[in-house]
Amino acid sequence: MKKIIVLGALMLTACVTINIYFPAAAAEKAADEIIRGIQEEGAPDATEPEASLSVWQVAVFRSLDSVINVVISPAQAQGADLSINSPEIRQVRASMESRFSSLKPFYNAGFIGIQADGLLTVRNAGAVPLQDRNKVNKLVAAENADRQRLYQAIANANGHPEWAAQIKSTFAARWVSHAQPGWWYQSSNGSWKQK
């Protein structure tokens, strides 16, 4: 009987539950970095090769770095950082960065706004000049698709696809925080405000 009690106690202590919590602070930091990168027009691209290195040398170093990171994973404090550097994330960011200069005049004119969920919307289609309506609708649709892809890509890159909704929520607040003066955003109660 004593052996059964000891065995039962050992089995109970062997059941360990590991809770992985969503790193909200790291998500805010990642969102800030990405949004600043998208909205900084004319900012130097951090991925451009240095002038002293040829294109092929940079390609070799990047390939070597990727191989090393696969073989030896970079040391990170658990949950202290979110990875925002995967091929899919870089592709989505590049698409959003190139689109921003086309969106900015429509933000500035008040034609588009940031919804409470962080996605864009055409606030008043009738106010948009007729020749720009199709362009605005296409830009907003493309931007919203990329934002959704970005959130899922970040969640996937960090091994937690279930975090996509939390990442979206974090980004929603950060999009508003980074809105420039005069831009419109929707508060959580659904009313529109101008920053």
Image (cartoon, rainbow, N blue to C red):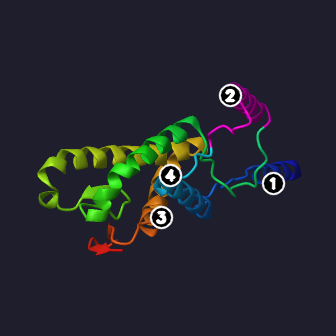
Which quadrant holds residue 56?
A: top right
Which kind of residue does numbered mark 2 sit on?
Ala
Residue 45 showing in the rendered view:
yes
> Label 3, on which residue?
174
Q: Residues within 10 Å of mark 4 (few under 14, many from 20)?
A: few
Mark 3 or 2, closer to the camera: 2
Say above or below: 80 vs 158. below
> Label 2, on which residue?
59
Mark 3 or 1, closer to the camera: 3
Mark 2 or 4, closer to the camera: 4
Residue 67, image x, y percentages: 74, 29
Which quadrant holds residue 169?
A: bottom left
Residue 165, image x, y percentages: 45, 54
Q: Earlier in the sequence, mark 1 or mark 4?
A: 1
Q: Residues within 10 Å of mark 2 (few under 14, many from 20)?
A: few
- Which quadrant: the C terminus? bottom left
Element marked by disc 3: helix
Residue nearest the observer in this picture, 5 or 194: 194
Q: Tags 3 and 2 in contact by the CB under 8 Å rule?
A: no
Cα distance in 3D space between marks 3 and 1: 48 Å
Q: Tags 2 and 4 in contact by the CB under 8 Å rule?
A: no
> Label 4, on which residue?
42
Which range is magenta?
A: 47-72
Cα distance in 3D space between marks 3 and 2: 33 Å
Element marked by disc 1: helix
Cα distance in 3D space between marks 2 and 1: 56 Å
Mark 1 or 4, closer to the camera: 4
Residue at left 31%, top 74%?
194
Tell whether 84 sits left or right of 131.
right
> Label 1, on which residue?
9
